[in-house]
Image (cartoon, rainbow, N blue to C red):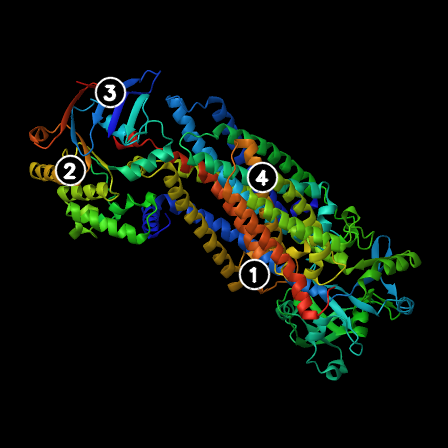
Amino acid sequence: MEVFLSNRVLIYIFSESVLFVLFIIAVIGSISIIRGWDFNASTSKQYALEKRAYLIILIIIFSLVFKIALMPYFAYTIDSLKALVPGAMCATGVLESGDFGKELLFLKLVILFFIGIWLIINHKDLQATNYPYLKAKFWFFIFIFLLLGFEFVLDIVYFSTINIQKSAKCCSAIFGVLGDDTLPFGLNIYMLLALFYLLFILNLVLSFQKRYLLLAISSFAFLYISYQTIIHFFGTYIYQLPTHRCPFCMLQTEYFYIGYLLWATLFLGVFFGISNLILKILIKKEILNLYRYSQVFNTIFVILCSLYPLIYFIKNGVFL
Amino acid sequence: MIEIKNLNMTFNPDSQKEFKALKNINLSIEKNNLTIIKGVSGSGKSTLLSLISALLKPTSGEIIVDAHNIAKLPEHHASKFRAKNIGFIFQSFNLFDSLSVSENISLALIPLGFNPNEISQKTQKAMKIANIDHKSNQNVNNLSGGEKQRCAIARALVNEPKIILCDEPTANLDEANSLKFIQTLKMLKSLDKTLIIATHDPLFEKISFADKIVHMKDGEIL
Amino acid sequence: MNNSSFLNFLFLLIYKHRAKHLAIFIILLILVALLSSTLFITSSIKKEVLDTLDAQPDFIVQKIRGGRSVDIDTDIVEEFRSIRGVMEVKPRVFGRYFVTDKMQYFTIVGIDFFEESMDKKLKKVFENLDIKKFLEKDNMLVGDGVKKFLAQKHYKKYMHFKTPDAGVKKVYIYDTFKDDTNLISNDLIITDIELAREILGISKTKATDIILNIPNDAEQDNIKLKLLSKHYDTRVITKKDIENSYEYLFNYKSGVFLLLFMICILTFMIILYQRYSMINSNDKKEIATLRSIGWSIKDILKLKVLETLFIGIWAFVLGVILAFVFVFGFNAPFLKEVFIGFNNLENSVTFSPVIDFGLLFSLFLFFIVPFVASILIPVWKIAITDPIEAMK
């Protein structure tokens, strides 16, 4: 419980709480709008609902923007806790130390993803002259709200169970260098790399062909493989140490915060790759620009990753 | 150009303060016409203008401007329509006292997303037409009634609207300025604008270039 | 839309509504300045303390009797030296000397000047010292607070210490010394190790504690276990333990402050909400005019949000700058007492500037999130003003 007295954790929880109150207001408004909405009615009640919709959308947009800003702040807060948790050298150890740390992080990413989808649907809805997706988007927001509530609970549980008495495992133990050095599916490093680049090219091809379902599947695969490749290969070139396998240390100052850029571009590339599938399901429409964004971000991501081993090779003549 | 069909406007429906401002209005206004709507205060003239400019939503009925029904537009689309197509001149001018003439005028262009150069050019043009360019940097506070009117006219013109609406434009002017205003109307008509004037000023009875005169009483067209 | 005409209009509105904004601006400014000052002070102290800690030994071994630390036998030193992985072992002699019945004290540290000192900070203190001259008679180096205190009691050149065997020892003040910020050195007295033993009543075969340096971090846990298993009556305090407890202490102190501040912020949020919810007829007319010339509710929301955000952000920036100048320029009069404490000798501390962007961003989040949350509904209320009603 002492962890709560760390400044950053306090400020993080405080901000999350304020935002959660805003979300509650928004969801109450959403429910009232869904119940009473009838675009073709010319009653003053309908007009009042339209005005209320502006408030709800305003609240949601601001809260979501802050939510996005709180994501790197969460990473930063966890990183700063490594001084309190014995044995933790970076955020990885701290995440392991509390209950549901990794689940919480995963949930946050999922929420960010759905936030992005919501913003796209909202934009489309406002472009049209008859609010075609209004009910869909508010129902969708109610779904997101449930996730947000769950996240808030997990936040409290996680931070209150961080154990400052017990040693945390360090990334070497977690990502299996000292332990068993297994890559997923028993691949070796070359096959992993090959899979990485192949999936990237597959993503490009599918997005040019605008096949949203296959692209979504391929993007998921790319996400998973990229995650493994960064930890087991590219990360080692960022840290210039073959045994340092950690997804979080690259967020720190020593590495010029490159971690934020890498994970952000991967997230965005995968987000835009999957989004058209979700949009098709929710509002039966796809947006062509999103294919292009997915290509752009995926490409930036792959180039950034590849630069590290390349530069290392140019400087040193060998690979690690 | 403007078709109004079965337009009804009831304020505060289903309550004690219920007030039927417009009852089953049907009206047709041709392009480039000058239409005068006559009636005493409370006859529904201002309400009708507000509805045509999409500032208000009707209880029922259609308002079709250039084949678009603007009656049911969501507010952000309605505002866009108004910003692009409507110029409004009010009885009390509704200018911002603490701004200069040109600043007041350029306010109407801000929602349309023009860059500063374009704003400047259009503002100049409008001020010239309204004959107020020599007072461009003057604070509106220091203008006479007639000059304020001309500033309001310039603001109503700056977005190059198809339709100009005037709500009791001469109510706060003396006779000389009122006559000047009527001359301005002639000039505006020559600029291919569709003009609708709501007024009960008797000076308007003698206008020769009015295409239609509509009489309203208690929310109905007589 | 973000061009000079819009901005011009925005600034005009801000100026026009300045009466409404002024109170909020000032309150927020004060809140930000107060919290920022607090956090700047704690950051600065923390950095100073942790820096000092860096120069501390890896292990401190104490003998425990009845739960309290007692003098430890120095013959244990050889035994420690023989443990593999231990680089340096040294006995230390130091203690408190109480000078008033108000529990004020000096910290007396005995230094063996002929042995290399492990404490880098102390080493810096007497790099210019003529050791031979210092050891000619019973001399001491004193910190600022000690000097002031003695001067008040009219002891300008020497002091009489009462030794535990009921004797009196006259010790001359050789010189004063000061570390960078006066935090640690204030109540310190440095003497030769044997003199310290005399004053504190520690026999020649004993020491206050024994320090060890173990260069390889990985071996520390092992060695600690070895020590404890051999000597059941000792306690081993590691540098990491001290770091952790300081970290904990600082977190706790500033955490408590932050919690108090949260209550202030919540109150402020209510004030904000009410203030900006007060819409007078002039405001309504403004909005009505804008709506009628083509501004949408969205445009007006943008205008109003930017207007209030401008006030909020400026109050924040100026508050932080104010705090910075207050703490690092003027050394935070009045506020620093809360942190340094009146408990021991009077202290004139200087804070060395610490610019931590993480801290600044944390402050920003802490103020701006509730600020924006409070203004959203009031701003919306203004923006949806019915233009027809307002123009009548």
Task: Let me know if residue C282 appears in the view.
Answer: no
Q: Position of residue A264 (x, y in %)?
A: 59, 50
- Find numbered disc 2 in the image and state the secondary structure of the residue it sits on: helix
- What residue would you read off at disc 4? A212
Disc 3 residue type (three-letter):
Ile
Question: What is the quadrant of residue A160 in the picture?
Answer: top right
Disc 3: which residue: B25
Specify whether disc 3 shares its chain with disc 4: no
Name the element at disc 1: loop
The chain carrying label 4 is: A
- How packed mark 1 is, by other alpha carbons closer than 10 Å (few <14, some 14-19, many 20 or more), is few
* Kind of residue indicated by mark 1: Ile
Image spot of residue B199 (x, y percent): 15, 29
Q: Secondary structure at mark 4?
A: helix
Query: Which quadrant would residue B186 be assigned to in this image?
Result: top left
Is residue B220 placed above or below C57 in the rendered structure? Answer: above
Q: Are marks 1 and 2 in contact (CB under 8 Å)?
A: no
Q: Position of residue A200 (x, y in %)?
A: 63, 50
Residue at figure coordinates x 56%, y 57% from the top left: C357
Discs 2 and 4 lie in a common subunit: no
Q: Are marks 1 and 3 in contact (CB under 8 Å)?
A: no
Chain on which label 3 sits: B
* Mark 1 or 2: the one toward you: 2
Q: Are marks 1 and 3 on the same chain?
A: no
Q: Tell us which disc is closer to us: 3 or 2.
A: 2
Q: For residue C355, which numbered disc appears in the image?
A: 1
Query: Disc 2 marks which amino acid?
Result: Lys
Q: Of circles 1 and 3, which is in front?
A: 3
